[in-house]
Amino acid sequence: MTQREILQAVQDDSWMMEVLSAVVSLRLPDWSIGAGFVRNKVWDVLHGYKESTPLNDIDVIYFDEKNVGEKDEKRIEQQLKKLRPDLPWSVKNQARMALVRGDEPYKNAEDGLSRWIETATCVGVRLDKKGKLILAAPLGIDDLVELVIRQNILAKIPKKLFEKRITDKRWLTIWPKLRVI
């Protein structure tokens, strides 16, 4: 599966496009929807699933160095809940997350995305001002499309937490073709 095919799979999914449209309407700076939103879609397609695997949450990220308070994230979540109360929104400003994680300041949202726990999770998608889909994959898409779960060394987390996430999320049961490296 190529980047173009990933974007086509998202574009062909009317629900995903509705979710993206809700977020774009808020005009957030440097935003995307990451993690399971894209990852699960790719894994579902590569497993031949006709129905989408349900998401625990919809991870919206953005980058705003001027407003790094958690209250700003909660305000944006509330705006999204007004637009789509049926969805489990989770909003995080990557400028704030660098502080929370004790990392050097991130350059942008994609830099924050590059620090997520699994390499296959470090993907996001957004709509630009003209409605064109843009894929953010700071670590590439190889692990994602090759069905590999690999700990991201940039995430700086203990191996036990990485392993616990795999177990708790039941990824190997949901997508049996996955390989843990």
Image: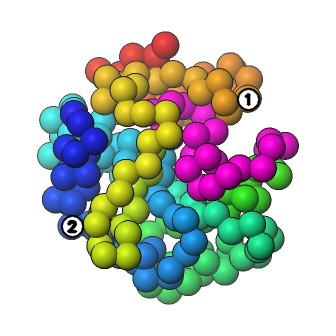
Amino acid type of the residue that numbered disc 1 sits on in the rendered structure: Lys
Image position, residue 58 (x, y; %): 48, 59
Residue 101 against residue 83 in the figure, above or below? above
Image position, residue 29 (x, y; %): 57, 71
Residue 135 against residue 79 in the figure, above or below? above
Q: Kindly indicate whether the residue at mark 1 contacts the one at mark 2 (C-beta within 8 angstroms).
A: no
Task: Kindly identify which residue carries mark 2.
Answer: 14
In the displayed structure, does residue 44 sit left or right of residue 91? Answer: left
Mark 2 and mark 1: Cα distance apart in space: 36 Å
Helix, strand or loop under label 1? loop
Badge 1 local density, few (<14 within 10 Å), some, or many (20+)?
A: few
Q: Residue at x 60, y 34 (%)?
A: 117
Depth check, mark 2 against mark 1: the one in front is 1
Badge 2 local density, few (<14 within 10 Å), some, or many (20+)?
A: few
In the displayed structure, does residue 112 sit left or right of residue 66? Answer: left
Q: Residue at x 36, y 26 (%)?
A: 142
Residue 156: mark: 1
- As for residue 44 lying within the magenta part, the answer is no
Instruction: Give the extent of the magenta segment.
Output: 101-122
* Quarter the N terminus occupies: top left
In the displayed structure, does residue 130 sit left or right of residue 94? Answer: left
Amino acid type of the residue that numbered disc 2 sits on in the rendered structure: Ser
Image position, residue 133 (x, y; %): 30, 61
Residue 73: mark: none
Say which of 70 and 175 sits in front: 70
Say which of 22 and 50 sits in front: 22
- As for residue 104 lying within the magenta part, the answer is yes
Image position, residue 73 (x, y; %): 68, 71
Helix, strand or loop under label 2? helix
Work out whether residue 41 can be spotted.
yes
Task: Examine the image and state in which quarter residue 12 appears.
Answer: bottom left
Is tag 2's residue or tag 1's residue first in the polypeptide sequence? 2
